[in-house]
Image (cartoon, helix red, strand yellow):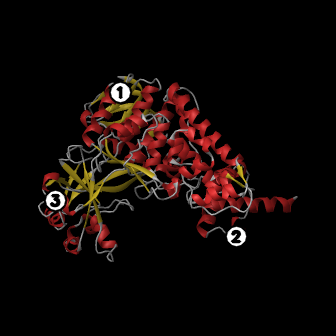
Amino acid sequence: MNYDVIIIGGGHAGVEAALSSARMGNKTLMISMLAENVGATSCNPAIGGLAKGHLVRELDALGGEMGLITDAAGIQFRILNQTKGPAVRGSRAQIDMDRYRVIARNKILNTPNLDLVQEMADSLIIENNEVKGVKTNLLNEYGAKRVIITSGTFLKGVIHIGEIQQEGGRFGEQTSIGLSNSLKECGFEIGRLKTGTCARIDSSSIDFSVMEEQGGDEVPSPFSFRTNRKEFRETKKQIPCFIAYTNQNTHDIIESNFYRAPLFTGQIEGTGPRYCPSIEDKVNRFRDKDRHHLFIEPQTMDNTECYINGMSTSLPPEVQQQMIHSVNGMENAKIVRYGYAIEYDFVDPRELRHSLETKKIKGLYLAGQINGTTGYEEAAAQGLMAGINASLSLQGKEPLVLRRDEAYIGVLIDDLVTKGTKEPYRMFTSRAEYRLLLREESADTRLSHYGHELGLISDEFYESVKLKDKQIKEGALLLEETKFTPNKEFIALLESMGEVPIKDISTAQQLVARKSFDVDKMIKIVPELDKYDDYIKEEILVEGKYARYIDKQSEEIERMKKYLKVSIPEDFDFRQVSGLSKEIVEKLEAFNPPTLQAAMQISGITPAAIEILHIYIRMASKRNK
């Protein structure tokens, strides 16, 4: 009954926390109500997306499991924003929900050092502000040196379907009241959030012939760097999704029932996700829109049941029937499960250190939706980091804290613990200041050395990452050193490719930086690069295209590292700094940070504000000399 690490909850955060802890040599226990629901995808049957795909790639590079499970359970793979720059592209996969869950559960059940008990954590055992274990609903007590809570939407969860309210952490599952009360007794700041899901439809009752078919990429790309790319592309079977649309009739049905919508009647108090609103919220907020996209997504390879992405709702069942039947192609749709909203407790993430350990209780870590995030990917990333840092703590080592310039995971955690959140937090590429350096395809070369040092990445895979990094650097250097003169032969070659001639001596790097240059054109001017694999050539092209911007961002990062250590004079007058907003000045005066590093940790203080402060501190220093 005694363990090194206990994980409460078996969702995506819990799975990554438990596996990383056990693989780092800890005797680990997962407490979850139902073994068959470990790794369940409670909402949409998909992994990844814009910025979320980056998180999956990063946790894979560190030794996490989500990417591997997605590759095994995926039924359609697409790169979003394919026509845009590589920094904002995002991998997304439709998954077989049943298979994903089975693979995740089996990983948990077959991992050495890892036990699973099907109970409900009821309270924490705390002594002298240090966690000692967990009590369950069966009155069992499990001792532990470290505890990680990954409770998802189960803390005092309340489900809303029209006027109906019922306790539940997920449809058909119990809510957790005792654990929430235990956290409140510890003095944590508890808030309330809301999320929701849509109805599920019997696929055989849908007329797909009147909808737009949306297939996967012709050449699918795996999520995990550890998946055999060639074998994956040759064997992976994909099935299509479909696009439908709401119409004016749909909107009229919804609007005429606003008075029964829990979102508008005051029945729901928690704040919902801004960027994933319910259909009633969309109809209310965007009255100028005469239709909204609906993505009809299969939940399994057999496609017996579909998820209506874009129609999340908590309207009453009979209203859901009417609005679904109003959509072209779903006139005879049979609803297998109605949509619902769920409210749940979360802990203000400013209660946490960057390691995800709580400030109030030593040895207690929080990960996932309990920290105010939304999405499987954000949860999994936090779970992995909590598992890693709990393990490092047991070894007497410093925590692994990823910087904003080295990982989206670093951006995610830094945003949460320094700024907090009042609505479900979702990752976007726009949140990352250094996104050119944080491309999906570079996650392994950026982060795998950490995973290898932790023992979560094999020697064999790490050697392949080092080889990839070496080849990309060789190729980038070749582009930089290869020069061309504007002679007749080279101008003719450029014109044959539809390229504008050069007038001065130019490097291959300058040429590939052109928007019109692709891999084929790069190989024509530098044929030596053709010896590399296709994905290596693609990365060499990207490095060449963005070399100037990447160098600029790298210089900015080094500059930031230096001046974050700069001291702020005790008598410094923040009101004399031109360019700082009134809100930022008030926060700086309230906290009176001793260094620029400390100022950066204050919620709402931007990198631009830090730059301005640094300039004024230097000016003040010169005046005082």
Residue 569 as seen in the image, left or right of residue 432: right
- Is residue 555 visible in the rendered image? The answer is yes
Residue 318 as seen in the image, left or right of residue 10: left
Marks 1/3: CA–CA distance? 53 Å
Q: Residue at x 69, y 64 (%)?
A: 574
Of the residues tagged 1 and 2, which is closer to the observer?
2
Give the image location of residue 360, x and y in percent: 49, 42
Say which amino acid is labelled 2. Ser
Check disc 1 and report the residue beneath it: 142
Mark 1 nearby-residue class (10 Å; few <14, some 14–19, many ≥20): some
Q: Along the polypeptide, which appears first: circle 1 or circle 3?
A: 1
Say which amino acid is labelled 3. Asp
Q: Is residue 519 above or below residue 269?
A: above
Give the image location of residue 561, x and y in percent: 69, 48
Quadrant assignment for the C terminus:
bottom right
Q: Quadrant of residue 368?
A: top left
Q: Which mark is residue 578?
A: 2
Judging from the image, what secondary structure is the residue with disc 2 in?
A: loop
Residue that extends furthest to the right in the rendered view of this protein: 625
Of the residues tagged 2 and 3, which is closer to the observer?
3
Give the image location of residue 268, x and y in percent: 29, 61
Check disc 3 and report the residue beneath it: 207
Residue that extends furthest to the bottom in the rendered view of this protein: 288
Q: Along the polypeptide, which appears first: circle 1 or circle 2?
A: 1
Judging from the image, what secondary structure is the residue with disc 1 in?
A: strand
Say which amino acid is labelled 1. Tyr
